[in-house]
Image (spheres, rainbow, N blue to C red):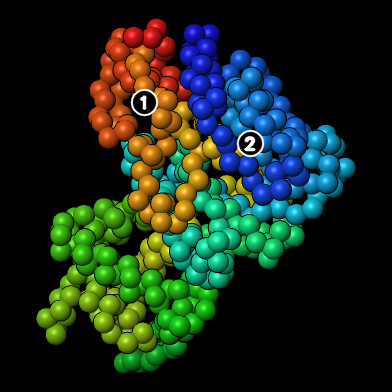
């Protein structure tokens, strides 16, 4: 009970001093809430003024606050069929939990990995392949383990679930057979038949050109990694994706083997003509495994939560609200802000940076917050933002104010 009361008091102070950011057509949205001291989920709420929602947040102090990606003619109607669906934003939810590479990583490392996926989604797919304008996009830190990217364009508002599912399939490469996007030729050499796979020119659209462009970009990155940290680091990079260290070592050994021109094979991927790049591998097995690595690096790996995008009635976190399991702000970001954004500093509410609280951590806790490293075990007075974070995550109990 003390934990809930502490968090409620801190959240109430935040909502008193700060306004949430309401979505376009906010009076046409449904709102939903979860609470610190109530076991039910409140849904089918509607608000018709900014003052009304401010009053609700301060008086009820929700643990989590959501709004519908859809807008309705009657958003407070509890019968979904009678709400009168008018359209919906296109929303992507990238969460670290859905990226295998984050397994076993510290919270800070997980956030860095998912941020890379979010940047790839925005730059390569939404602004790139789909050609949306930057003004149509809204990026927000989820307050937890990822990012929400909203597309608010008339081009997508009326898309149904099936059309949105196709978009998800495209960006995740879920059912993509990468070999279908390569030119296939049969070669007979010394009476032996061999299948050659060649790349399409990089200016081709969709996955055809994307594979060609990304092989160059990724190979440059791998070469830089090799030159700075050595072969073992590159092996670990491959193993993090392919989950087969023996195969990863063989691929890396082949890629960085010297050729007759006294250059490493990987340099041919960067510098030679598109049609020659895939012929450097000793075996088809190594080439195919390398292509699977390329596919994993191209596709968006954080969009495993497909229902968020395909569900045209979905509730998503209200921007500017607080996440009940971290105390972080669900923070809106421009594209420029996103590139330099550090959630462990920038998403901490200002009022949480004032004062200290005594907490009890049953197990030793190590966390980096607000640019400081904390190692906590037993009873200790810590800044309120540390107390809120650890109590909200169930890693410590609140005892008293310091």
How many numbered marks does the figure carry? 2
Given this view, does label 2 or label 1 mark the residue nearer the observer?
Answer: 1
Residue 61 in view: yes
Q: Which of 325 and 290 is in front in this view?
A: 325
Q: Nearer the viewer, residue 218 or 367?
A: 367
Q: Is mark 2 on a helix, strand or loop?
A: strand
Residue 306 position within the rendered picture, expressed as x and y whole percent measured from the top left: 60, 50
Residue 300 position within the rendered picture, expressed as x and y whole percent measured from the top left: 48, 57
Is 43 positioned to the left or the right of 123 in the image?
right
Residue 122 position within the rendered picture, expressed as x and y whole percent measured from the top left: 48, 60
Is 222 positioned to the left or the right of 215 in the image?
left
Residue 169 in view: no
Q: Quadrant of residue 288?
A: bottom left
Tell me the tag on residue 66: 2
Residue sitting farthest toward the right: 82
Residue at x 51%, y 51% (from the top left corner)? 139
Residue 136 position within the rendered picture, expressed as x and y whole percent measured from the top left: 58, 60
Q: In which quarter of the image is residue 166?
A: bottom right
Residue at x 55%, y 61% (from the top left corner)? 135
Q: Distance between the residues labelled 2 and 1?
A: 25 Å
Q: Which of 205 and 272 is in front in this view?
A: 205
Q: Quadrant of the C terminus?
A: top left
Q: Kindly identify which residue carries mark 1.
A: 353
Label 1 crowd (10 A; few <14 / some 14-19 / many >=20): few
Residue at x 31%, y 58% (from the top left corner)? 238
Q: In this picture, is 80 found above or below 400?
A: below
Q: Which of marks 2 and 1 is nearer the N terminus?
A: 2
Q: In this picture, is 254 found above or below 164?
A: below
């Amino acid at each position: 009970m003390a934990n809930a009361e502490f968090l409620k008091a801190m959240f109430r102070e935040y909502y008193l001093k700060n306004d949430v950011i309401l979505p376009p057509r906010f009076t046409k949205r449904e709102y939903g809430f979860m609470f610190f001291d109530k076991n039910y989920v409140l849904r089918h709420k509607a608000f018709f003024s900014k003052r009304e929602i401010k009053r609700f947040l301060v008086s009820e102090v929700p643990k989590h606050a959501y709004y519908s990606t859809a807008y309705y003619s009657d958003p407070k109607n509890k019968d979904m069929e009678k709400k009168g669906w008018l359209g919906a934003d296109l929303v992507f939810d990238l969460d670290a939990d859905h990226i295998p590479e984050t397994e076993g990583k510290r919270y800070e490392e997980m956030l860095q990995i998912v941020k890379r996926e979010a940047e790839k989604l925005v730059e390569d797919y939404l602004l790139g392949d789909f050609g949306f304008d930057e003004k149509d996009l809204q990026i927000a830190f989820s307050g937890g383990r990822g990012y929400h990217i909203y597309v608010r364009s008339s081009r997508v508002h009326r898309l149904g679930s099936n059309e949105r599912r196709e978009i998800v399939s495209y960006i995740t490469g879920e059912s993509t057979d990468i070999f279908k996007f390569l030119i296939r030729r049969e070669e007979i050499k010394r009476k032996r038949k061999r299948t050659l796979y060649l790349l399409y020119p990089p200016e081709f659209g969709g996955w055809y050109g994307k594979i060609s462009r990304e092989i160059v970009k990724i190979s440059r990155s791998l070469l830089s990694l090799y030159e700075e940290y050595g072969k073992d680091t590159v092996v670990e990079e491959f193993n993090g994706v392919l989950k087969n260290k023996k195969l990863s070592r063989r691929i890396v050994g082949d890629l960085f083997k010297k050729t007759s021109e006294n250059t490493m094979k990987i340099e041919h991927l960067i510098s030679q003509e598109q049609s020659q790049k895939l012929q450097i591998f000793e075996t088809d097995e190594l080439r195919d495994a390398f292509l699977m690595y390329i596919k994993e690096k191209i596709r968006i790996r954080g969009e495993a939560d497909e229902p968020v995008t395909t569900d045209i009635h979905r509730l998503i976190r209200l921007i500017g609200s607080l996440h009940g399991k971290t105390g972080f702000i669900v923070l809106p970001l421009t594209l420029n802000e996103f590139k330099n954004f550090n959630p462990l500093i920038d998403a901490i509410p200002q009022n949480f940076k004032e004062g200290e609280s005594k907490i009890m951590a049953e197990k030793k806790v190590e966390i980096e917050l607000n640019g400081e490293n904390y190692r906590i075990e037993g009873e200790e007075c810590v800044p309120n933002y540390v107390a809120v974070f650890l109590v909200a995550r169930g890693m410590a109990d609140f005892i008293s104010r310091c």
